[in-house]
Image: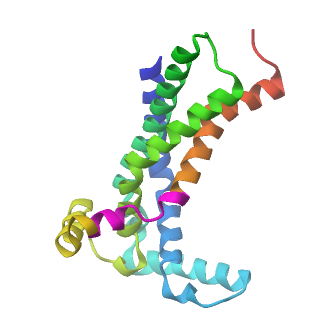
Amino acid sequence: MQAALTLAGGIAGGIQGYVLSPTLLLKTRVMTNDVFREKMSLWKTSLLSFKIGNQVIQNEGVGALMKGSGVFAIKRVCDWASRYYFSDVFSKCMLAHAGTTGLTPSEQIAADLLGGTASTIVTLPLDVIVAKMQDAKKAGSKISAWGLFKDELQQGGIRGLSQSYLQGFEARLLHVCFTTVAMKTGTGFMYDFLFGHKQ
């Protein structure tokens, strides 16, 4: 069952990666574009965001929307497979320690939070690689994940590489932990709340 759930989470994550890749690329282009460094209204920000999307298609072609999609899909597979796997591992550890047959809702949430933490540590470098590949400054250039990794290793060494690939750890940790709780445990709680627990 654990292998089946881990596999299901990984496959769903891979499909999600390909579907969401174009919107992720546009979001990254907007976030890394120097135009947005000045203060502006929500209307102007939205208008400029749409213009950047049109520029990507006009200058680089529709295929550019899928730039980095392979790495992103692999990252999503690792994301969800590791979230489900680590959450189940911590659940089993807690069950063995307590000597009971089931976990309380708070205990299951705790297992999900621990699983999300372990998943963040494992997958954060892939998350950073995707963002770097889709950066606005790299528009129009063909970049491989391995090439990007080697270049940064040569320029900054191990220390520079570790600093670069651990950026945003706290924000990523919060995101992963709470999405793990929502998808792994929260959906079941909500279903039981709306439709009643199935005996």
User: Could you say where residue 24 lies in the image, as x and y percent from the top left?
Assistant: 50, 62
Q: Does the magenta stretch include residue 164?
A: yes
Residue 180 shown in magenta: no
Q: In this view, does 86 lie above or below 17?
A: above
**5 or 180: which is nearer to us?**
180
Q: Position of residue 102 (x, y in %)?
A: 63, 14
Identify the residue at image location x=27%, y=61%: 145
Classify 16 as above or below 29.
Answer: above
Q: Residue furthest front?
A: 97
Give the tally of numbered discs: 0
Pick the front one: 121 or 96: 96
Q: Is the magenta stretch mostly helix, strand or loop?
A: helix
Query: Residue at the location (29% across, 76% down)?
Result: 141
Q: Residue at x 63, y 28 (%)?
A: 108
Front in this rendered view, residue 156 or 46:
156
One can see residue 103 in this view = yes
When the figure is inspected, residue 91 is found, relative to residue 14, above or below; the finding is above
In the image, taking residue 155 as reference, residue 55 lies left or right, namely right
Locate residue 91: give its quadrant. top right
User: Which residue is at a point 53% across and 69% down the rendered structure image?
Assistant: 27
| Picture coordinates of residue 132, whole percent (x, y) | 37, 69
Quadrant into which the C terminus falls: top right
Q: Position of residue 46 (x, y in %)?
A: 66, 78
The range drawn in magenta is 160-171
Residue 73 in view of the camera:
no
